């Protein structure tokens, strides 16, 4: 079938070649008229064959392959940017750095504490960060260790679901503590920047 299609597509060009060979024996006006008609028939045949994918298929496939590679490369770059934002968030939270955390939150941020079910909006959560930062300054709170492990990222276009295990230890009002939590985040990409839109944690154990 492919050979037959190729032969059909070749015939118009063969006819043009024959016409050119007879050009010296053909009056100029008749030759131009015959050539124009043959080219018109060739154009019509190409349009008829186009829906069947003849000759056009390799070009279309190549374009699709390029688009697929381009999307894959863009997705990887976007995930790298998200990981960088998560790292910045973790570093800022460890030090209760309000100025570092605020730009990484959406205006409608929602924070849910798994320990008591408390729901905080962006303003109230940042107020809690301010309070803990003052506690750090007054040494009522100390953070000896804070770490994130087992990071899981599921990309969904301009949003992402993120899960990990957080561990922290230190003292609060002179009493030692150790926390292990499974955390879940919702991140969204807006105006070229990743921001956290939601948070929920579940304590794995508390000491």
Image: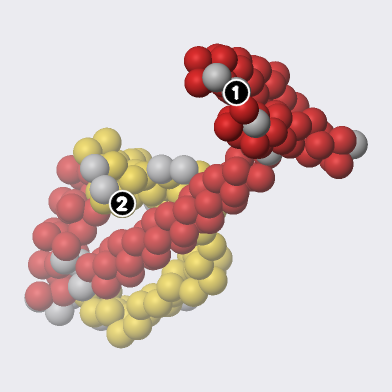
Picture residue at 38% right of the left edge, 48% below the top: 187
Residue with the mark numbered 1: 26
Q: With 36 as the anchor, is 38 left or right in this view?
A: right
Q: Say which label, 1 or 2, has the lower sequence index.
A: 1
161 in relation to 176, above or below: above
Is residue 126 visible in this depiction of the protein?
yes
Q: Residue at x 69, y 33 (%)?
A: 18
Quadrant that contains the N terminus: top right
Relative to 144, is 140 on the left or the right? Answer: left
For residue 169, what is the image quadrant? bottom left
Of helix, strand and loop, which one carries label 2? Answer: strand
Asked where in the image residue 136 lies, by quadrant, the reply is: bottom left
SS under mark 1? loop
Q: Which residue is mark 2?
A: 194
Labels 1, 2: front one:
1
| Residue at 22% in and 38% down | 107
Q: Foreground: 98 or 190?
A: 190
Q: Which mark is residue 187?
A: none
* Figure quadrant of residue 100: bottom left
Which residue is more in the foreground, 104 or 147? 104
Q: Is 183 above or below relative to 55? A: below
Q: Residues within 10 Å of mark 1 (few under 14, many from 20)?
A: few
How far from the left and from the top, in percent, is residue 73? 46, 59
Residue in the foreground of this view, choosing between 13 and 78: 13
In percent of width and height, residue 108 lies at 27, 36
């Amino acid at each position: 079938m492919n050979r037959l299609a190729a032969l059909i597509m070749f015939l118009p060009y063969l006819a043009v070649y024959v016409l050119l060979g007879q050009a010296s024996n053909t009056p100029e006006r008749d030759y131009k008229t015959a050539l124009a008609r043959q080219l018109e028939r060739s154009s019509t045949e190409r349009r008829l064959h186009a829906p069947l994918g003849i000759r056009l298929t390799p070009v279309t496939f190549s374009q699709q392959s390029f688009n697929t590679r381009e999307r894959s490369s863009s997705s990887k770059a976007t995930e790298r940017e998200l990981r960088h934002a998560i790292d910045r968030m973790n570093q800022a939270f460890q030090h209760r750095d309000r100025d570092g955390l605020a730009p990484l939150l959406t205006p409608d941020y929602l924070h849910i504490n798994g320990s008591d079910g408390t729901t905080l909006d962006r303003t109230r959560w940042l107020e809690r960060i301010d309070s803990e930062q003052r506690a750090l300054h007054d040494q009522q709170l100390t953070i000896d260790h804070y770490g994130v492990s087992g990071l899981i990222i599921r990309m969904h276009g301009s949003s992402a679901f993120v899960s990990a295990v957080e561990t922290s230890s230190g003292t609060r009002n002179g009493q030692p503590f150790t926390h292990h939590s499974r955390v879940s985040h919702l991140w969204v990409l807006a105006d070229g920047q990743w921001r956290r839109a939601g948070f929920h944690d579940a304590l794995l154990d508390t000491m």
